[in-house]
Amino acid sequence: NFSYGHIKMVCADRAWKVTDAFCSDHRCGGGPGSVNFGGKLSKVAYQLPAGDGFLELNCPSGARSPEGKVHLECGPSEEGKRDIWHFVNQTCQACAPSTATFTLDGHNLTFELGPG
């Protein structure tokens, strides 16, 4: 038994077929993601774990503030099919504006981060 998920089936050609399925013990599934910090760091890949609530990731070693963190929150997707990780903020770059892009399950999410 799983705590979250769904299985969608349709009747086609006189048989039931699975068109979408997601089953997990967590609201947000895990998988590859990335943050585009711009500049010399550019796009940095992360392996996102399955989870619920908030997620804190380490900044890359080449960041202006490598001791900083990237924060994500599990929440609804635009399609409403399942929850996905959403970018909240980052403290890897103290003042430089940048763009954060996450790709998870084929969905691209891009956020413009102003100077701070």
Image (cartoon, grey):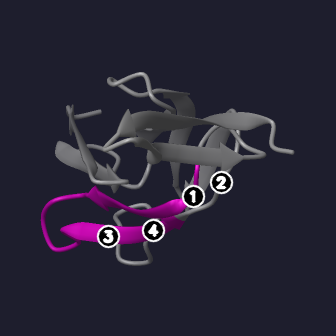
Q: Which amino acid is tagged 2?
A: Ala
**Residue nearest the viewer, comparing 79 with 54:** 79
Instruction: Identify the residue under disc 2.
Output: 50
The residue drawn where x is 60% and y is 42% is: 28
Q: Which residue is disc 1 drawn over?
A: 30
Q: Position of residue 18 (x, y in %)?
A: 47, 47
Q: Counting other residues with Cα less than 10 Å from the Cα at mark 1, is it few (<14), some (14-19), or many (20 or more)?
A: some
Please provide the residue range marked out in magenta.
29-47
Which residue has dot 4 on it?
Answer: 46
Q: Secondary structure at mark 4?
A: strand
Crowd class of label 2 (few under 14; some 14 to 19; many from 20; radius 10 Å): some
Residue under the image location 51 percent in, 32 percent down: 82
The label number, if any, that marks residue 40 in the structure image: none
* Residue under pointer 3: 44
Please tell me whether mark 3 sits on a helix, a strand or a loop.
strand
The answer to whether the residue labelled 1 contacts the one labelled 2, judged by CB atoms less than 8 Å apart, is yes
Q: Amino acid at mark 4?
A: Tyr
x and y percentages locating residue 113 in the rendered image:
23, 35
The amino acid on which the numbered mark 1 sits, given as a three-letter code, is Gly
